[in-house]
């Protein structure tokens, strides 16, 4: 396989993991795609492979694709369903092939909810992505608290690693990444990690930059929230 194809596959894997974090930036970041289409028989084999990993009775939809001379990749989603609570959910999977055979990753269940919170003296419009292990009430509570901390905190939030050098960067990071104002929507992601819950500020990521997150201990713990950053 050509070097640029290998590099592109690595990029695709990283971008796929970002879809729930920064979907509007992910597709724009694709590079080195020789042909953004699939031949009809190739697409049929892709759909069959996707059906094999999706829950029964869900029809795969082609979200994006890229083809080279001897390989290809694609993102597969299902139709979005809106629940009575206002939560929208769907499934998503990444698929790749060599010269012939398509292989699809285990699909991820995606949930999203739109709301507004009052923080920093104004309403903030949020689009929240979260996983099936976290209930909506917890998502609303943690997101509201995280946005309040981000907008209003004048003292540094502790760094999760505990180093004072990192702690001093909190205010600088916030100043360089102000929250959206007006009708612009902020996309955040709530993730569960063992006994911790994270709120990641997805739309405050710049190319080559880090993504800021606030960590909350599970309920009942006396630990205070702390912040961290990760590469997109």
Image: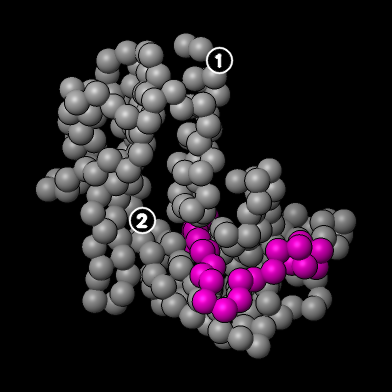
Residue at (47, 44) in percent of width and height: 27
Residue at (49, 20) in percent of width and height: 5
- Compared with residue 201, is residue 58 higher up or lower down, i.e. above or below? above
Depth check: give the residue in front, 165 or 173: 173
Q: Secondary structure at mark 1?
A: helix
* Alpha carbon distance from label 2 to label 1: 32 Å
Report the disc number at residue 3: 1
Percent position (x, y) of residue 39? 24, 23
Residue 184 belongs to the span the image colors magenta: yes
| Residue, disc 2 | 110
Residue at (46, 68) in percent of width and height: 127
Residue 99 belongs to the span the image colors magenta: no
Q: Please indicate, yes or no, whether residue 102 appears anywhere in the rendered image.
A: yes
Percent position (x, y) of residue 82? 25, 68
110 lies left or right of 138: left
Percent position (x, y) of residue 98? 35, 16
Residue at (27, 18) in percent of width and height: 101
Mark 2 surroundings within 10 Å by alpha-carbon count, few (fewer than 14), some (14 through 19), many (20 or more) = some
Range of the magenta residues? 171-193
């Amino acid at each position: 396989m050509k070097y640029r194809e290998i590099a592109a596959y690595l990029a695709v894997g990283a971008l796929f993991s970002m879809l729930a974090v920064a979907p509007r930036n992910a597709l724009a970041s694709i590079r080195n795609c020789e042909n953004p289409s699939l031949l009809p028989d190739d697409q049929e084999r892709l759909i069959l492979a996707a059906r094999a990993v999706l829950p029964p009775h869900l029809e795969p939809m082609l979200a994006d694709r890229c083809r080279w001379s001897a390989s290809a990749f694609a993102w597969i989603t299902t139709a979005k369903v809106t629940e009575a609570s206002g939560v929208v959910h769907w499934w998503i999977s990444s698929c790749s092939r060599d010269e012939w055979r398509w292989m699809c990753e285990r699909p991820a269940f995606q949930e999203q909810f739109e709301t507004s919170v009052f923080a920093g003296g104004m309403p903030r419009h949020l689009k929240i992505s979260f996983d099936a292990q976290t209930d909506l009430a917890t998502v609303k509570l943690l997101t509201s608290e995280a946005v309040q901390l981000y907008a209003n905190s004048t003292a540094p939030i502790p760094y999760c690693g505990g180093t004072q050098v990192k702690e001093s960067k909190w205010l600088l990071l916030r100043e360089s990444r102000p929250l959206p104002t007006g009708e612009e929507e902020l996309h955040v992601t709530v993730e569960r990690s063992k006994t911790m819950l994270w709120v990641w500020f997805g739309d405050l990521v710049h190319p080559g930059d880090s993504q800021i997150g606030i960590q909350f201990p599970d309920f009942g713990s006396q630990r205070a929230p702390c912040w961290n950053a990760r590469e997109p």
